[in-house]
Amino acid sequence: MTLFRFNTVDVFAERQFGGNPLAVVHGADTLTTEQMQAVAAEFNLSETTFVLRPQDPAHTARVRIFTPRAELPFAGHPNVGTAYVLASEAERRGRPYANDTLTFEELGGLVTVNVLRNGAGIVGAHVAAPQPLKIGSGVAPGAVSALCGLPTHAIEQSRHLPLIASAGNPFVFTQLRDRAALRSAKPNEAAFEAHLPRDMAAGLFLYIREPANDPPIQARAFAPLHGIPEDPATGSANVALIGLLAHLNSKPDLVLKARIGQGVDMGRPSLLEAMAAKRGGVVTATKVGGQCIPVMSGTLTIR
């Protein structure tokens, strides 16, 4: 029988029980992949992370990320939440990380996470995408319609057709015409199996733009084949979204920032701060971050 410490934290949250909950399991070096997957299914959160010793001692940790059904190469809210938990513990021990920066070894590559502070101390983190923005193939509006139960006329096609994009974790990005359409979307798991298998993209990301409102972007994310009917806050999708929006902007050089709301329609309002830098017509960097709120801590028993 082996005991493992764990913490849960609400990520991209402005209040407790908002945002996207994450479980962080410490000292997981002796766990097998099958055990990690079983633990993630037991927590049944969008993602659970497992913290292991780094292969390179210059790095902070090796981090593995699991949904209830599969391992992910990279994800945003697990990195933000894991960094918040590790940095908060280091601060309490009187050994804060140099420059408030953590480096994680992940399947998607090296991930750099920076701690966010206010006058009260550590409040969150922001993560740089481990890979450059990649624009993939287009997806037929009819397929998207089947995935989310909306008519094709609800899809805004003036700026871009539905398409796959990634900054470490691919999603199908679709802009909708209005808030009513976003509110009405419902994932259809059978349609995901037919049109969007897990090896094609992690899920479907729907968004609207309302410049007069705050936040000016609202979004929803569906990933039923990963055991996530709807995700309250999806950092890996939002970091690719800000890159996509910068890519579509006609200016060759810019720094684009956006506040993005997600999870409102499922009762877990989340707020993400995203940034993309573009130089010479090429998106060169993307980041996403937000606040975290601790919720639980305890021990996990593996027999």
Image (spheres, rainbow, N blue to C red):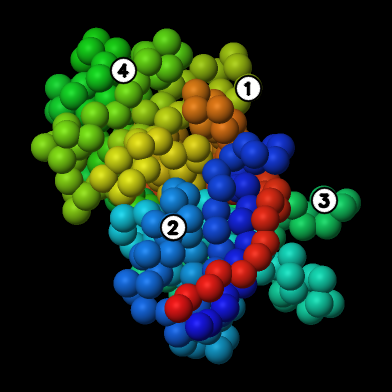
- For the residues marked 1 and 2, what is the alpha-carbon distance in whole angstroms? 36 Å
Kindly identify which numbered label has been placed on residue 214: 1
Q: Earlier in the sequence, mark 4 or mark 1?
A: 4
Residue that carries the numbered disc 2 in the rendered image: 42
Up the image or down, 186 lies above or below 237; here it is above
Q: Quadrant of residue 196?
A: top left
Residue 247: percent from left, percent from top? 38, 39
Identify the secondary structure beneath mark 4: loop
Circle nearer the N terminus (3, 4): 3
The residue mark sitting in front, 3 or 2, is 2
Query: As drawn, is 196 to the left or to the right of 106?
Result: left
Give the distance between the C-alpha atoms of the residues marked 4 and 1, in whole angstroms: 20 Å
Mark 1 or mark 3, which has the lower sequence index? 3
Q: CA distance from mark 1 to mark 3?
A: 22 Å
Spot occupied by residue 250 in the image (x, y as percentages of width and height): 39, 31
Circle 4 residue: 156
Please name the amino acid that badge 1 sits on: Asp
